[in-house]
Image: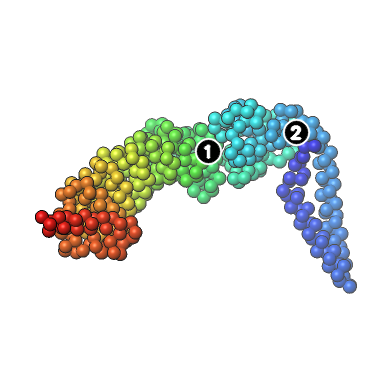
Amino acid sequence: MAKTDVFDSDPAVVAKATELKKELQRLVRAIVDEEDCSTQKIDQAKETLSALKELKLRKRSLALKLNDILSCPEEFRCPISKELMRDPVIVSTGQTYDRLFIQKMLKSGNRICPQTQQVLSHTILTPNHLVRGMISQWCKDRGIQLSDPALLVNEDGITASDRDHLLSLLQKMSSTLPEQKEAAKELRLLTKRIPSFRALFGESLDAIPLLLSPLSEGKFEGGIHLELQEDVITTLLNLSIHDNNKKLVAETPMVMPLLIEALQSGTIQTKSNAAAALFTLSALDSNKTLIGESGALKPLIDLLDEGHPLAMKDVASAIFNLCVTHENKARAVRVGAVKTILRKITNRMHVDELLTILALLSSHPKAVEEMGDLGAVPCLLSIIRDTKCDRSKENCIAVLHTICFNDPTKWKEMREEEKNYRTISELAKNGTSRAKRKAGGILDRLNRAVNLTHTA
């Protein structure tokens, strides 16, 4: 027989019954253990028993309606649980299920529609307001009061009221400017503080376009409203943090153009958050390609060139993540990454982070050629002498190794450095294991060259 939750799953009733039983156990134990127990404890025990009796009678009264619930129309039952649906939702095949049960199935990795046996094209769940209304009316006609769907909580802590609140905020994003600003600010705060609100955006294909609508449906008088843009882009960053959203966010058509626009025209906070969003989205390899093809590397390099302290780390992180792929390395080199990075590290700005990018780019032939032409060798040698960071020394010697073995004209500078400062020898002795290996390779080449000279 199917199990109803009219009484047994009512959290308030269950909690109250448990509390009363514990209190009754305590009072009975005290009455039995005390030789001369007080009448007050006996009265309290009686009152507790009466309260339990009242709950029991309530349960019986509710149970009288069980047969009604079990005989409900078949279309009101969830095909998975076989129970009366509390929060009916539609999946991509058009079938309706109770949200709690279909979500549990999806979380287990099963994407086969139980009814049609088709693979679900997406996992977005759309509320079936028609069926919910019919169930509500059917229950009302029979005097059955079911749990409010707005109070039902799924495993992510999301309730129907959360969904309704999100929908109302997203609808305001297409309203007047004051309402847009108010809604955008609240969405920014909610997606920052409550992870479940980030997950909610993944349940609807329309949610992200609605969020971005104020930025994509034309400009206000005098251009983009900068405060609104900052709140919207920051909300987009918050959404990108949620792993299940990364693909959806990146593949929403208007996202990349608006992030690029934010990098170019937003406040410095907006620019920084747009860069951070690109960094988090690029955690997926497919997104790395998509972001690179969108043209985002050029504004990122330009922002790096601006050198604002607030944005530098986010920008550097985004560029590094994107340049893991060979295609994006080529794009970064074409838009001036090598020149910009060398200028920054020469001026000792964010040296550690930028050297990591430079080392990554050094696997691209055109980048190595540019490094040699732009004076990278003396710059990197001076950093090895000056810095106390082992990782920076390692990246410097790795780039120098690549430059010198690709451009024989640079060996003269290396010999002079070794002669005057013994920089390479010191690193070969005290560097990281990788630094020792690269420095050793350079020293071997220098020594062979000296030996050949002496032999000649």
The part of the image, by quadrant, that contains residue 161 is top right
Residue found farthest to the front: 455
Circle on res. 139: 2
According to the image, label 1 marks what residue? 202
Front residue of 397/309: it is: 397
Residue shown at 54% from the left, 30% from the top: 121
The answer to whether 245 appears left or right of 443 in the picture is: right
The total of numbered circles placed on residues is 2
Residue 331 image position (x, y, % from top left): 30, 38
Dot placed on the residue nearer the N-terminal end, 1 or 2: 2
The answer to whether 41 appears left or right of 367 in the picture is: right
Residue shown at 32% from the left, 47% from the top: 360
- The CA distance from mark 1 to mark 2 is 32 Å
> Dot 1: within a 10 Å radius of its alpha carbon, few (fewer than 14), some, or many (20 or more) residues?
many
The amino acid type of the residue labelled 2 equals Cys
The amino acid type of the residue labelled 1 equals Gly
Front residue of 233/317: it is: 317
Can residue 188 be seen in the rendering of this structure? no
Front residue of 74/309: it is: 74
The part of the image, by quadrant, that contains residue 24 is bottom right
